[in-house]
Amino acid sequence: MKGDYVFLYILVFLSLFFISIVFLLGFELYQGSSQIFSIYGINFILGSVWDPVKNIYGIAPIIVGSFLTCLIALILAVPISLLVAYFISDLTPAKLKPFVSSLVELLAAVPSVIYGLWGLLVLAPFLRSNVYLPLQKTFYFIPIFQGASTGYGILTAGIILAIMILPTITSIIREAIELLPLQIKEAAISLGAFRYQVARIIFIHLKLTIIAAIILGFARAFGEAMAVAMVIGGKHGFPVSIFDTGYTLPSIIVNEFTEAVNPLHYDALIAVGFILFIIALLNIVFARLLIYRSTRFFKLSIT
Amino acid sequence: MNAVSRILMVGIVVVIIVVAGVTYWYLSQTPTQATRIKISGAGSTFMAYFVQKAAYEYAQKYPVDIDYAPIGSGAGIQQFLAGTVDFGGSDAPLSTQQWQQAGDALHIPVIIGGVVIIYNIPDLPPNTHLNFTGQVLADIYLGKITKWNDPALVSLNSELKNINQPIIVVHRSDGSGTTYIFTQYLSLVSQEFAQKVGYGVSVNWPAPNKIGGKGNEGVAAQVKNNPYSIGYVEFTYAVKNNLLYGYLENPSTGEFVEPTVKTIAKTADYVSLSLPSGDKDWSSISIVKSFLELAKTNKNLSGAYPIVSFAYIIMHKELSKVPNMTKEKAKALVDFLKWLVTDAQQYAEPLYYVPLPQSVRNLDLQTLSMVTFNGSNL
């Protein structure tokens, strides 16, 4: 009995310890950036010029760049993830299933700097000559297809992020499909549904899980620093075409923090970290709430 | 328990015993670590290979271990000011404010770096070295010269006459000492660049047709993959990777100079007389600036490449200010640094760094002789 109490106290201590680390982190980031917020106020978030030489710090284009790369990543990754998840859970022979799913999850195990190097040296030059330049030639009259196309930029970063978040989204949805009561599938099949109709019914049932998976994938993409920093091109300013270069919140920290000799520049980067922390926190909370709601929904629907 | 798992258990126990025994034997063989002096430094990534190589060689000869963490110049200065490291490494000198905060900081140039211009023009025959002047480079990076066959470029390089292609400007997207030196050079040669952009470790580039690359490798890759682009990288990186680079005008003689170990060291040698003593405020000191000023009056500074800079080790003059410093350790640190700026310079060239000329070594030794511990000389 005594052992139980000791065990309990150890667990309580450990959990409190980790919770307090999150709060300390937030507090530390806030403290480090408070000077920036008192000098620039809301202009730090709404300003569009980032010029460390003249001590002007505005991160609106960087926030836009962050959301834009993640949006591109999600547009590319979500449909593929859904289909791959359905394929693995329902169509793959049982013997091959662990093999196929672990291959997909292997994508998540590749370190991000490897993706970055691959993007820098292989993907960007390939996309430039085989995709971007032909696209530009065909759609030259549409404004967002104009401008210089170097292979580096927001679109390439989005494509790399799509590959990186694919396993995250796939594995969440796959597990959810496998947890789905068998009766739903059986009912659909016994009514003579086609395969894509079965898939549709499954996805409709998993609506909330899918949204949560997307949000978690988004969080992963939003926080990715290294791979993005290597291919995004680092332009301070709003992107004017889909081939344009830009910046994201984590990649500017990776890029500029090590050599930020100017104290205000240093603080501004910590403030970027604070904004990133807030957005990431909101994201996770939102996803957790959705997952919570969706699991409750299942318990209700089964009984 | 079946036979297989019993054998497995015995096997694991045997392995653990053997590993523990070997580890114990190995540890008892090496001399005890307690008698070795530990010194820590952190900062500039540029000088890291050199300092680490020197530290390794030094540890073979003397019972002193120097641990240098390449965390970047900005972070290195922060750590130095906070007293968490014994010395800092930086590509840029301390700002006046930081220098005052430190109280008694010494600047010790330990190695020289240069910035070279790289480009990719597929139409040119291989190994064509283009000529550039500071003004032309500033105009390219300002976005005023946008084509390779611009008259200003053609007058320097007749082979560019028929290359009617837009210039893609590649710059460093990460904060870097290379950008600092390059933009400083451009600001000094062009009034307009100084006003519109200024200089720093990361700046707001005005050229419209541009890409940022992360690190020297990022800039090099983007120049390689984008025809008709131009970029700038650290000299050591260009040499190590056999990149094709441009020649730069020497403002003193008007000749176009190839960046080499010799021409870069030469520039540092020319300006060494104008350098202040190591305990003064170095915030406004730069080789580029001193050289360009010298070149205005002296027209005989031949064979000098203009975009050159020092990497500094920064330390306290009164070492008892550093937490956990002992007299013994202070002496070891000063001895190491004296060795670093003299004998250790032999390791610079094999690692593609530019060693210090004799004049700067003398200045460093003078600076190091000022170091004290609790007021007494070391």
Image (cartoon, grey):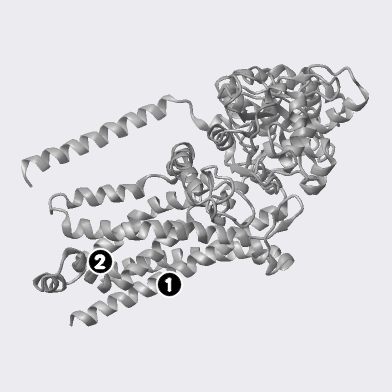
Q: Quadrant of the C terminus of chain B?
A: top right
Question: Which percent across, then down, holds residue A53?
Answer: 75, 49
Left or right of residue B26, residue B128 in this image:
right
Q: In the image, what residue occupies the spot 62% across and 26% down?
A: B236
Residues indicated by labels 2 and 1 sit on the same polypeptide chain = yes
Q: Residue furthest left?
A: B2
Question: Which percent across, then down, holds residue B74?
Answer: 67, 45
Q: In the image, what residue occupies the spot 28% across and 75% down?
A: A295
Question: Which percent across, then down, holds residue B188?
Answer: 82, 37
Left or right of residue A6, residue A123 in this image:
right
Q: How many numbered discs sit on the rendered protein?
A: 2
Left or right of residue B274, residue A79 in this image:
left
Callout 2: 10 Å neighbours few (<14), some, many (20+)? some
Question: Which percent across, then down, holds residue A152?
Answer: 53, 44
Instruction: Give the residue number, with chain letter if any, for mark 1.
Output: A286
Q: Secondary structure at mark 2?
A: helix
Q: In the image, what residue occupies the spot 55% across and 45% down?
A: A149
Asked whether A129 or A4 is in front, the reply is A129
> Given the image, on which type of amino acid does mark 2 rest?
Ala
> Given the image, on which type of amino acid does mark 1 rest?
Phe
Mark 2 / mark 1, whichever is N-terminal: 2
Q: Work out whether B151 lies above or below A164.
A: above
Task: Name the chain letter of the residue that bears numbered label 1.
Answer: A
Left or right of residue B124, residue A282 in this image:
left
Q: In the image, what residue occupies the spot 6% across and 41% down?
A: B3
**Quadrant hosting residue A200:** bottom left
Instruction: Give the residue number, with chain letter if any, for mark 2.
Output: A176
Asked if one can make out residue B372 in the rendered structure from this viewpoint, the answer is no
